[in-house]
Amino acid sequence: MAFEWVILAYLFVTLAVILIFHDRFVNPSPMIWGRVGILAFMAVLWAAYRVKPCLANKVIRVTVHLALLSWWYPDTFEFNRLLPCLDHVFASLEQSVFGMQPALLFSKTFDSPVFSELMCLGYGSYFPMIAVVTIYYLIRKRVEFERVVFVIIAAFFIHYVIFVLLPVSGPQFYYYVVGEDQIAQGVFPNIGDYYHTAWDGNALPIPGEKGLFQTLVQTAHEAGERPTAAFPSSHVGITILLLLLAWHSRSKWLFFCLLPLGILMFFATFYIKAHYAIDAIAGLASGSLCYWLLMKMKIKTGQS
């Protein structure tokens, strides 16, 4: 299917980079064997569909690769940690645009448990929103199901390419290294290759008391978050793309059910210090552009 060609292109290009610059990566073996495993699994799923080209096997192919998006995400860190960190540039730009650091002040200004839970609810709704939109198209708009899956997965990999090339870690990592007291004074030092040589795996905790959603987001970050992928915010980018897909479906209830979560998502990205505010704004642009470009592409559907 079309989205699998996107994955294969990304897989082989990044594999070539790993093999060429093998000695510069911290631990390239899991990256190489992970790609080999995914390639083998893709071949098995393709063969199963060739034997029995039914809807169930098609859905399995889609589900597996949507789930694997969470594997590809931290992988971007292993590439961009080879490059100098650019957070000092983005924190300085943030200061120039807003005259402050929204990611630093937002959670301190609105520090009630209820507000924190709302923000974490919005941020934690990311993958459920993806599931809801794809399932809706599968059930109600099946003729467009493959196209929608292609649009979502291709948009993810477009963002991953940007993350590989643009090493911005985000406030939760940069503020932790520099110190929030320094950030509050407008000091944004260049930390260079810190994440390649000295990163200890730590970051600022998710703001708020330990409510249900705060705990879920904190646990997810401890399990899979890396100092990567800050600009543009893929959380905002994919969310705006999902809202546009919901609107495209002509289902008002789907769109208006997702809209409040989308609004929460936008503000949550810098409330929890995962992103700078300019990252969230850029996510609006990147998600909209991905939707516009990918929906215009002609792809084959109904093929193995």
Image (spheres, rainbow, N blue to C red):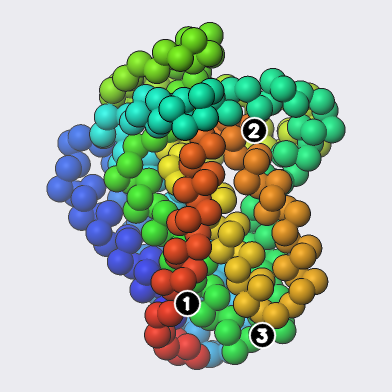
What label does residue 141 carry, if any?
A: 3
Q: Which residue is mark 1?
A: 295
Percent position (x, y) of residue 217?
67, 37
Whole-percent x and y of residue 96? 43, 27
Of residues 70 and 29, which is closer to you in this image? 70
| Quarter of the figure with the C terminus | bottom left
Q: Residue at x 32, y 19 (%)?
A: 190
Q: Could you tell me which secondary element the residue under label 3 belongs to?
A: loop
Is residue 276 something one can see in this rendering?
Answer: yes
Relative vertical location of residue 254 with respect to residue 216 in this rendering, above or below = below
What label sits on residue 278 in the rendered view?
none
Which three-letter amino acid code belongs to the residue tagged 2? Tyr
Q: Tell me the residue that label 2 is attached to.
A: 271
Q: Residue at (53%, 9%) from the top-left corner?
A: 181
Helix or strand or loop: what does disc 2 sit on?
helix
Q: Residue at x 38, y 39 (%)?
A: 77
Q: Are marks 2 and 3 in contact (CB under 8 Å)?
A: no
Given the image, on which type of amino acid does mark 3 rest? Lys
Q: Position of residue 58 (x, y in %)?
A: 56, 81
Q: Residues within 10 Å of mark 3 (few under 14, many from 20)?
A: few
**Label 1 SS:** helix
**Is 5 displayed left or right of 146 in the figure?**
left
At label 2, counting other C-alpha atoms closer than 10 Å, the crowd grade (few under 14, some 14-19, many 20 or more) is: many
Alpha carbons under labels 2 and 1: distance apart: 31 Å
